[in-house]
Amino acid sequence: MKRYRLSVCKGSSCKAGGSDAVATAAREELSTRKLQVRCELYRGGCYGFCHMGPNVVIREETGRKRDPLSPEDYQLMGWEGEAYYSHMTPEKMRRVVAEHIEQDKPVIELFGHPDEADE
């Protein structure tokens, strides 16, 4: 059974775009589906893709020792098992929890593409 860390951006642009509601939807969906033991939810810092927010990053927990000075809370790391979701809404977040977290199937069509031009 895979385990995950789910981060919802708490930067000012993402908050203005509704990241608090996205985080609430994630918390509620994880609880409803009893997935808290499989997924740690936290509020990450700004990932720098403010124009694409609210932003969510999910990383598969691999047992890697967590470095408190690592930039992973505010930067995409390019690690295996890392997924970046952009333009998130509470509805999209519920789908991501149901599919990515519960079924271990990332929702590819909701992935963000930070290397592409502004949408």
Image (spheres, grey):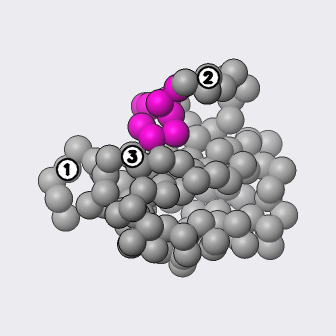
- Residue 66 circle label: none
Is 99 in front, or is 58?
A: 58
The N terminus - image quarter:
top right
From the viewer's perspective, is residue 112 above or below residue 71? below
Q: Residues within 10 Å of mark 1 (few under 14, many from 20)?
A: few
- Residue 67 circle label: 2
Q: Majority secondary structure of the magenta segment?
A: loop
Q: On the rendered structure, is 15 left or right of 20?
A: left
Name the residue at 45% across, 74% down.
18
Q: On the rendered structure, is 16 left or right of 96?
A: left
State whether residue 36 appears in this view: yes
Q: Are marks 1 and 3 in contact (CB under 8 Å)?
A: no
What amino acid does circle 3 point to?
Tyr
Q: Which residue is mark 1?
A: 116
| Residue mark closest to the camera, 1 vs 2 | 2
Spot the residue most to the left: 117
Q: Which residues are magenta?
A: 70-79
* Total numbered labels: 3
Name the residue at 44% across, 67% down.
15
Is 24 in front, or is 80?
A: 24
Q: Residues within 10 Å of mark 3 (few under 14, many from 20)?
A: many
**Label whose residue precedes the other's in the sequence (2 or 3):** 3
